Amino acid sequence: MLILSLSILASIFYGLATGHVLSRLFDKQGPSQKRTMILSTLAILAHLLVLVNSVFTVNGQDLSTVNVAMLTCWLIVVSVTAVSLKFPATLLLPVVYGFAALLMLGSLFIPHHILIHSIDIDLGLVIHISLSLLAYCVLIIATLYAVQFYFIDKRLKRRDIAIVQSHLPPLMQVERQLYQLLTVGTGLLTLALAAGFAFLEGMFAKEFLHKTVLSLIAWALFSAVTLGHHRLGWRGKPVVISVMVASGIVTMAYFGSRFVQEVILLKF
């Protein structure tokens, strides 16, 4: 009952924050930062309480795909909200808040109960998982910046007056932040894969083969785009599409098989 109430409360505050930002998306003054922060902070706190109560149960730790997805979503929401305090993120906020609201509601209907009664602490595994989670969060935020860049660039090319007079960030600033995030995220993904090969056995075992292969493909795409931009000046729509494709592949690597097994096939 507590998780149900907190999940609904978090989704409501996320929804209110999304509505407020969208209502002033093209306003010259932009959304009220104070109101946005109040609503998002309440949502983030409720989201955190849901995580604590969902993962740490009396019978053990529930590390199902849904709970891991909620944790990843929480980290992305906190990161984007923190970034918005210094840099305009008017297009990013409704996307992450809206997705978080849907995820919180969806988690109530998706079965997820994978209990681990004891966790063996392995330093190599902890390093690999931590780097992987951090890399994924940074790369997803970079993908959101890529979509934001494409949206603003397209509206500017159409000479849309509303986009010029809006509170949206300058195109060059978005592009600069996009490639900074992409560089950091690709570096973290490189370290995560290196840690996996260095500390873990069976990266190419049958049960992990698809994850390893998909992660390497995503890494190759992210690396190509990053190097292509810095050395060859790649930019524009092809870069945005490549980043989105790479993000989709790495998402499949991280969550694909577990989602199918736990949610569709109900194999816990």
Image: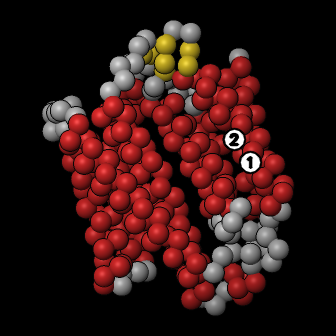
Q: Is residue 229 above or below residue 37?
A: below
Camera sees residue 252: no
Specify the amino acid type for callout 2: Ile
Estimate the spatial distance between the alpha carbons at disc 1 and disc 2, rounded to whole Å.
6 Å
Reading the image, the residue beneath label 2 is 44
Reading the image, the residue beneath label 1 is 40
Disc 2 on helix, strand or loop?
helix
Q: Residue at x 72, y 28 (%)?
A: 6
Q: Residue at x 63, y 81 (%)?
A: 170
Q: Which mark is drawn over residue 255?
A: none
| Image coords of residue 257 (percent x, y) | 32, 35
Mark 1 Cα shell of 10 Å, populated few (<14), some (14-19), many (≥20)? many
Q: Residue at x 27, y 48 (%)?
A: 193
Nearer-the-camera pick, 188 or 240: 188
Specify the amino acid type for callout 1: Ser
Q: Do residues under tags 1 and 2 come within 8 Å of each other at their CB atoms?
A: yes
Relative horizontal placement of residue 105, taking residue 175 as reference (left or right): right
Disc 1 on helix, strand or loop?
helix
In the rendered image, the residue lying farthest to the front is 123
| Image coords of residue 11 (percent x, y) | 70, 39
Task: Count the labels in the image.
Answer: 2
| Image coords of residue 260 (percent x, y) | 36, 33
In which quadrant of the rendered image does the C terminus lie? top left
Q: Residue at x 78, y 55 (%)?
A: 36
Q: Is residue 116 above or below residue 94?
A: above
Camera sees residue 106: yes
- Quadrant of the rendered image containing residue 14: top right
| Image coords of residue 5 (percent x, y) | 74, 25
Q: Is residue 227 above or below residue 219?
A: below
In which quadrant of the rendered image does the N terminus lie? top right
